[in-house]
Amino acid sequence: MIKLSNVEKSYDDAVVLKNCSMAMERGEFAFITGPSGAGKSTLLKLLYCSEQVDNGHISVDEWILSKLKKRTVPYFRRNIGVVFQDFKLLFNKTVFENVALSLRIHRMDPREIMERVKLILKEVKLLHKSDVFPQYLSGGEQQRVVIARAMVSQPMLLLADEPTGNLDTDNARTIMRLFREINTKGTTVLIATHNEDLYYGSGRRVFFLNNNHIEKEIVG
Amino acid sequence: MITLKYFLGTAFKSIWLEKWINLLTILSISIGLSILCLFLLITFNVESFMKQWTSSFGLVVYLDDHITYEETLHLEAQFKQDKDVLSVSYTSNVEALDEIKASLGANAVIMDDFKENPLPSIFELELASELLDKNEARQKADSIKQLPGVNDVQYGEKWLASLNTISDTMRLVAVFFASAIFISTIFTTYNTIKIFFYRRKEELKTLKLLGATNSFARLPFLIEGLFVGVVGGSVSSALVFAFSSLATTRIVEFMPSLSVVLSPLPVQVYLIIPAVGASMSLLGSLFAVGKIRY
């Protein structure tokens, strides 16, 4: 599903990733961890094509990202869901509109959009807040909206960047439960986190990113 | 169709949210187009006034003193066959002398001092409006002058040249005005859309991260630009129509004789103005969304 071989990425003179290699199977649930500045976010950015790789090979399913043309990027992105560290919610749109946006980009029928959004909002327990604007939601609720938006188009891959970073334990647990549910439906999930509590005892693969590459791989 | 509804919704929501800046843009466009249309209205009226004024413009063909009756008839037939000549009127030297004597009244005796009739016979030719150009008229006069039996041809050359100069100048100024207003309208919309674009930069980034294509992200801005242009043009149409109607009524009140000359702009112009506003505004928006990277 995901394959990185000898990936290199630098910002000006600062090397972020070098000889970085890893692979994930379809339907897998894995974590990527490491100290701050290790390159976790950069690795995810490479996976959703927000950054371009300098050297090496990256592929997601049939898409070879290291050779992807700029005009093809939007079509690739429609196959993945991303939970951004800074949420990237649109504050001039309601919860419903934020979640529906992914489907509108897919040019889906409005009736189907309505059904799908309601269903996913019910799953994340936010159906009653459909018409609320994000600024009136708590951090945990905002995070659930972001997850709903990432999941509503039923992507093959879900990438989450520090999804529990600003949440209390209860909210973090809820979010992790949502990710597990998503994974049981067949979506491959990759979570970037520095929170050990998320992966210890999970029984999932954990990639340790340090010194610009995947230093080791354990089962959490 | 479904997506169009979304684009329209997004565009109109933004128009409402940014109503003040949109209103200012609409005002700028409508003022610019109104100035242009008023100038067109004036040019149109001056041209129509000149057309009416020059409708009786013609050439006076002076004949040789010794021209025979047959030659005169031949010339008359030639003039009547000429498609550039609308009407032909002949005045013999005897008729001309009688006319002068009649106009002199009691002083007509001074004409008796001439041993011979000093006046030539003439043809007065009314020319088609296509020949109301100084070069065309000169060419015509020269060609007639070559005909046998013709002594001289005269027409209001200087007067016609002045009219032509006025007309050409007005057209030149109209083109200058049109170009200036065209550029300023495009620039106004360009700036407005660019401001909107920057204000919503983060939103656009998010849209792109969710898989939106450039056209998906940019189309609402183009709709917004188009709307601003159409409204600006329509306001301008209404203003010019109101001004034209009011001015015509007021001018005719003071100078009723001008009612024959004053002409309103053709109705089609009032329909074209919003279309012109829309296309200029759309062009400005296209430049704006095409140039910005996000």
Image (cartoon, rainbow, N blue to C red):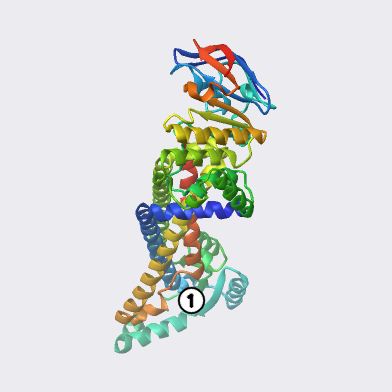
Residue A46 showing in the rendered view:
yes
**Viewer-side residue, B205 vs B265:** B205
The residue at the far right in this view is: A62
Q: In the rendered image, which quarter contains the N terminus of chain B?
A: bottom right
The residue drawn where x is 50% and y is 47% is A126
Instruction: Decide: is A20 above or below A150.
Output: above
Name the secondary structure under disc 1.
loop
**Horizontal relation, residue B205 to residue A107: left or right:** left
Q: Is residue B138 visible?
A: no
Q: Position of residue B24 (x, y in %)?
A: 35, 54
Residue B42: x and y, percent?
38, 65
- How many circles with numbers are drawn on the protein? 1
Q: Position of residue B144 (x, y in %)?
A: 54, 64
The foreground one among A14 and B149 is: A14
Amino acid at pointer 1 = Ser
Residue A5, above or below B13: above
Q: Which residue occupies 60% across, 22% down?
A: A203
For mark 1, name the chain.
B
Residue drawn at x 34%, y 82% as measured from the top left: B256
Nearer to me, B126 or B93: B126
**Position of B206 relative to A121 (above/below):** above
Q: From the viewer's perspective, is B237 left or right of B255?
A: right
Q: Quick one: label 1, few (<14), some, or many (20+) residues within 10 Å?
A: many
Residue B163 is drawn in which quadrant? bottom left
Could you say where residue A208 lies in the image, as x and y percent from the top left? 53, 15
| In the displayed structure image, the side of residue B168 where residue B7 appears, left or right | right
The residue pinned by badge 1 equals: B121
Residue closer to the observer: A66 or B156: A66
